[in-house]
Image: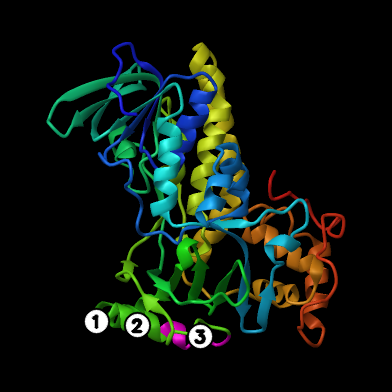
Amino acid sequence: MTARPVAGGYDVAIVGGSLAGCTAATLYARGGARVALIEKSPSMDHYKVMCTHFIQPTALPVIERLGLREPLEERGAVFGTLDIWTRDGWIRFPLPHELPPDEMPSVSVRRQTLDPMLRRVAAETPGVDYLPGLRVERLLGSEGRVTGVVATARDGSESQIRARLVVAADGRDSTMAAHARVPARVRPHNRIGYLAYFTGVEPRRPGVAQTWLMDPEVAYTFPNEDGVTVLAGWFLRSRLPDFKRNPEEALRRYFAALPSEGPDMEAAKMISKPLGKLDLPNRYRPPAARGMAFVGDAALATDPVWGVGCGWALQSGEWLADATVDAVTSGHGLDAGLESYSRRHRRTLGPHHFLIADLSTARKFNPLERLLFKAAIDDPVVNRMLRLWAARSGSPVSEVTPGLIARVVRAAGRNGHAPTAGPVPGPEVTAGIGRRQAVHA
């Protein structure tokens, strides 16, 4: 399953064997490319610990393309939806089996399950040389372009790995970006995050995660496989002394005091240490620079409050491979392929990143946002639009039309907020209200 670097070089060298890197490696190799997948950890089974383990519906087609849906279902991953609480009440999204044909469920699965599974898919794909236990020390270059990497093994031996394309898939603190001198545009994140794993937390609705928008704090319950639920919160920095003093007590106390349908903390058993992140700035890098490419958090690391990191890692790995596989195998047109990838990355994720980064300042929701939440409680069209936005499918810019705003205002002004009975609206209901995008597009 592991290999030595080949002397003749590769079509693609990918640095980082996590979600984005393994996705790209698998799809490149399936397209005929010779791939070096370089991972600093020597263990096939290592995984990211600090994660909400929530994958947006927009990434489900990538999971299916990789052949992972059935194995994940067999392992017990939760294919579900979401309920959102605001001060005006609960916004109920459809249960998974009630979703319209053009919408897909989210996926909740712990990284200790997902990461090794995806890594094995990549390592066992013909054309991929999996190179664990290597740390990239510097880049190789020619005429201003990156042409490979120099990596050191745990025994101190050094290898030069040359490739037509080098891909940085090494996370938000990308050392590859530092080696290439590609800085990130940074926007602050003014919350702190704590999470822990629990058993004994029964979901209020089967397959449904819960979100409390406490404005500006946010809390979640994410059901995962094996009856494990992740309880995560994103708090104002003023709470930091409490969490530093006793993080388990602070987390339990916060969830016990949630205003509606919170987890039964008396029955909840914490099975992990509380995990905290005190500084998570939003970072954006050019998706391609100097003839190399960035995927996953190495390209765009956004506020984890909104659960986009895993999905965007999978999607960006797919986009890059699709845009450049012909170029790396033929030796022609790589710059055009990288530009195509960059445009898609910016066009699809840029507007979402802008709004997420704005909200990560811990500002209060503005009047239009509050009206949208209020209207989504009992208006089926607004509810669907919010689902698409929450799934990072519908555009947060182009879909805000005068027609939608008028409907939001009318719906929010009605008395009562009980969810509307009847069938879940499909795409035909929302026709004419902005530009729609199917979740699987």
Circle 2/circle 1 CB separation < 8 Å:
yes
**Residue numbers of the magenta segment:** 254-260
Residue at the spot of label 3: 258
Q: Distance between the residues labelled 2 and 1?
A: 9 Å
Q: Distance between the residues labelled 1 and 3?
A: 21 Å
User: Local crowd at mark 2 within 10 Å, few (<14), some, or many (≥20)?
Assistant: some
Q: Give the x, y percent position of residue 276.
A: 32, 68
* Residue depicted at x 27% and y 81%: 246
Residue at the spot of label 1: 245
Q: In this view, does 71 lie to the left or right of 233?
A: right
- The three-letter amino acid code for the residue at tag 2 is Ala
Quadrant assignment for the N terminus: top left
Q: Is residue 241 left or right of residue 89?
A: left
Mark 2 or mark 1: whose residue is earlier in sequence:
1
Circle 2/circle 3 CB separation < 8 Å:
no
Q: Is residue 414 above or below residue 29?
A: below
Mark 2 or mark 3: whose residue is earlier in sequence:
2
- The three-letter amino acid code for the residue at tag 1 is Arg
Residue at the spot of label 2: 250
* Residue depicted at x 66% and y 52%: 393
